[in-house]
Image (cartoon, rainbow, N blue to C red):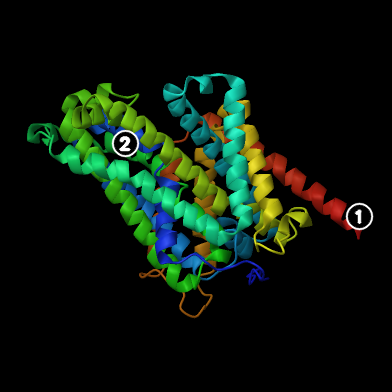
């Protein structure tokens, strides 16, 4: 069995720099504006340890993505890897849970955070009708941009990513000048349990972002070269940003950081930039959310296309635009579903799927890495140490899974059972059509 498609008709336009910036953009979203207070509440000034632990554990998983991603160069990301290793049912469930149960829900939540932030400055966005119109313009505009071409989309996402990072860089640079050394002193080191709880919070802020960029592998130049360099560079930049923001927030606010759970960076900005600091952070948060949405639209909208290409979804979703060389029906479907989630509010009840979903996908990718370890592809990256990294990644993912709430586990079981039935119904229908 082999489903390594050349993705004929798609343009390979994503290089190392663009992939790295996409990974940064897809990870740094709304969470960074609230995260410092949440982590400080768990481990105080020793928060930097939680960032190191989380990045190390998640890094093991991401190294598996890199290895298998350089061997399978077609669009789809985790779906393509798992489908190649374990067959169409596993691929269909991965594909569905990734875009329908994870990315669209997560991005819908981010879209609402963006609208909430802008509503502070533009009161009409508190009104339901204006909010729906605003979100429609956002999704329709990004869908149109993505249909127009991958070149235009990557250029736009790169620009927005740089724009969203500038306020955070300014906060870091000028915030250092307002830090107090005593605020960074660790008076009590955390227990392993507390450190684990803080790392878990960070995991769900870090996870699911950078690896989503590999969903557009079919549009990445020379994947065996670009993926390990661009992907890991992006993850390293994310780590530096998150850690720097945490240290600056702790250094400026000290013990008061824990009390600023709603807007810790707004509180820091008020000290660093004065009375306009909060407004500065509100705009920065909105731009950051928009950047994540735009980046997700480029990479995750290719996931339904990949499933349709392999015969797991209706064939029209695999059509490539004759002029723009983009999977336009897949883009329209993805934008429509996320928009519906965003305006319905119902996604809040379904959002419990997201954390468990990405962990299950991690398990599948790690298992695919082990199964496809013997496959030889010229120039492909292979992790050193034999199966050491995949096994450690399995242990790390299992530990994170053990911390999930029962409702999350039940929700995923129900989701998988339902779509397994859908898969077999679709297969029976397809046989009947033949």
Q: Residue 164: x and y, percent?
A: 38, 44
Q: Which image quadrant for residue 64?
A: bottom left
* Disc ID at residue 432: 1
Q: Which residue is located at x 58 percent, y 24 percent?
A: 130
Q: Is residue 93 above or below residue 383?
A: above
Instruction: Say whether residue 76 is left or right of residue 253.
Output: right
Q: Which image quadrant for residue 419?
A: top right
Q: Nearer the viewer, residue 319 or 72?
A: 319
Instruction: Say whether residue 240 is left or right of residue 141.
Output: left
Q: Provide the residue designation for mark 2.
A: 198
Mark 1 crowd level (few <14, some 14–19, many ≥20, 10 Å Cα): few
Q: Residue 193: x and y, percent?
A: 29, 35
In 3D space, how far apart are the residues under numbered discs 2 and 1 (Cα atoms)? 52 Å
| Lower position in the chain sequence, tag 2 or tag 1 | 2
Can residue 379 be seen by looking at this rendering? Answer: yes
Q: Residue 219: x and y, percent?
A: 56, 65
Q: Which residue is located at x 44 percent, y 60 percent?
A: 19
């Amino acid at each position: 069995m082999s489903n390594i498609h050349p993705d004929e008709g798609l343009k390979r336009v994503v290089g190392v720099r663009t992939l790295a910036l996409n990974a940064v953009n897809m990870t740094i979203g709304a969470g960074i504006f609230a995260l410092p207070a949440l982590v400080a509440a768990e481990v105080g000034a020793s928060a930097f340890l939680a960032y190191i632990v989380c990045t190390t554990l998640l890094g093991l998983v991401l190294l598996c993505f890199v290895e298998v991603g350089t061997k399978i160069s077609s669009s789809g990301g985790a779906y393509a890897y798992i489908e190649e290793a374990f067959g169409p049912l596993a691929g269909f469930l991965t594909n569905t849970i990734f875009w329908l149960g994870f990315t669209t829900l997560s991005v819908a939540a981010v879209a609402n955070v963006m609208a909430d932030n802008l509503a502070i400055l533009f009161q009409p966005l508190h009104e339901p009708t204006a909010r729906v119109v605003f979100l429609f313009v956002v999704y329709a505009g990004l869908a149109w941009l993505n249909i127009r071409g991958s070149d235009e989309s990557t250029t736009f996402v790169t620009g927005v990513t740089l724009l969203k990072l500038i306020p955070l860089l300014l906060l870091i640079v000028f915030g250092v000048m307002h830090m107090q050394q005593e605020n960074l002193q660790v008076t009590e080191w955390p227990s392993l349990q507390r450190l684990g709880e803080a790392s878990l919070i960070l995991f769900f802020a870090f996870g699911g972002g950078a690896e989503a960029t590999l969903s557009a592998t079919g549009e990445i130049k020379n994947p065996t070269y670009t993926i390990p360099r661009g992907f890991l560079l992006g993850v390293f930049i994310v780590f530096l940003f998150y850690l720097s923001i945490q240290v600056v927030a702790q250094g400026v606010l000290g013990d008061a950081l824990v009390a600023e759970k709603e807007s810790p960076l707004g509180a820091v900005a008020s000290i660093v930039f004065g009375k306009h600091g909060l407004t500065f952070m509100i705009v920065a948060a909105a731009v950051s959310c928009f950047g994540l949405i735009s980046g997700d639209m480029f990479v995750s909208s290719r996931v339904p296309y990949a499933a349709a290409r392999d015969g797991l979804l209706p064939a029209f979703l695999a059509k490539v635009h004759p002029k723009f060389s983009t999977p336009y029906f897949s883009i329209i479907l993805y934008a429509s579903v996320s928009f519906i989630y965003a305006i319905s509010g119902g996604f809040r009840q379904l959002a419990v799927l997201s954390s468990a979903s990405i962990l299950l996908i991690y398990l599948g990718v790690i298992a695919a890495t082990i199964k496809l370890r013997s496959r030889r592809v010229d120039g492909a990256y292979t992790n050193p140490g034999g199966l050491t990294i995949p096994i450690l990644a399995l242990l790390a993912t299992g530990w994170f899974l053990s911390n999930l709430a029962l409702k999350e586990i039940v929700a995923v079981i129900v989701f998988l059972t339902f779509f397994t039935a859908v898969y077999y119904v679709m297969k029976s229908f397809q046989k009947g059509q033949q």
